[in-house]
């Protein structure tokens, strides 16, 4: 079982255990020698290799991303067109809902009932006329403007609004 021996362990592992303190201090002051030692250490070499692998990987990913850029731009343009179409459809639906609401307000059950009642009253008036005066033409067929308001005696249909 290995124990952590601190900074001294790395110096011993690198073969510096046989050097005196003065020799070690001299090595510490020599920059070129220190750089050479660091570059030769396995840990540094592994880190340098990892760095190069990551750089190569990043380069490949960057190339792939640049290759996908036209597809991305086309997708963005297509999406913008779809959003515009959606907005137009939304406006069309809103307009149709407005018209449907207006139509539904016009053709409520109460409105239909009042139209039916008016038609019933009209038919009852005609029946009463024919029963009282026989087959002679009623005044709404003779005097269009005064009796019928210009409808020429026609009874309003349920499907047509006034």
Image (spheres, rainbow, N blue to C red):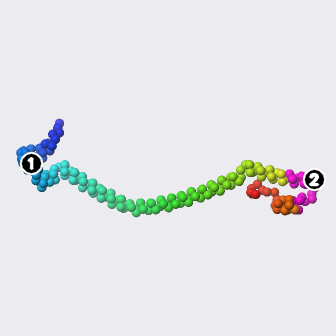
Tag nearer the camera, 1 or 2? 1
Q: Which mark is residue 119?
A: none
C-alpha span from label 1 to label 2: 139 Å
Quadrant of the drawing holding the N terminus? top left
Q: Could you tell which of marks 1 and 2 lies nearer the N-terminus?
A: 1
| Residue 153 visible in the snapshot | no
The answer to whether residue 69 is magenta is no
Pointer 2 residue: 132
Quadrant in which the C terminus appears:
bottom right
The image shows residue 46 at horizontal and vertical percentages of 21, 50
* Viewer-side residue, 95 vs 18: 95
Q: Is residue 9 left or right of residue 51?
A: left
- Tell me where residue 53 appears, x and y as whole percent: 26, 54
Where disc 2 sits, the SS reads helix
Quadrant of the image occupied by residue 139: bottom right
Residue found 67% across the figure and 55% down from its top: 102
Assign the magenta stretch its main secondary structure: helix
Per the image, the residue denoted by label 1 is 25
Highlighted magenta segment, given as a residue range: 124-142
Residue 129: in magenta span: yes
Tally of numbered tags: 2
Q: Residue at x 16, y 50 (%)?
A: 41
1 and 2 marks in contact (CB < 8 Å): no
Residue for point 92% across, 52% down: 131
Q: Is residue 76 visible from the viewing direction of this image? A: yes
Measured as percent of width and height from the top left, residue 77 is found at: 46, 62
């Amino acid at each position: 079982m290995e124990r952590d021996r601190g900074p001294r362990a790395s110096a011993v592992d690198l073969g510096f255990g046989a050097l005196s303190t003065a020799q070690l201090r001299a090595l510490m002051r020599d920059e070129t020698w220190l750089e050479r030692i660091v570059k030769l250490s396995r840990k540094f070499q592994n880190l340098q290799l990892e760095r190069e692998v990551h750089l190569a990987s990043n380069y490949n990913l960057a190339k792939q991303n640049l290759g996908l850029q036209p597809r991305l731009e086309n997708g963005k343009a297509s999406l913008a067109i779809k959003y515009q179409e959606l907005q137009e459809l939304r406006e069309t639906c809103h307009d149709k809902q407005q018209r449907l609401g207006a139509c539904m307000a016009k053709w409520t059950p109460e409105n239909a009932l009042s139209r039916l009642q008016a038609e019933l009253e009209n038919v009852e008036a005609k029946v009463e006329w024919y029963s009282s005066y026989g087959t002679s033409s009623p005044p709404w067929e003779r005097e269009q403007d005064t009796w019928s308001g210009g409808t020429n005696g026609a009874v309003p249909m349920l499907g047509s609004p006034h």
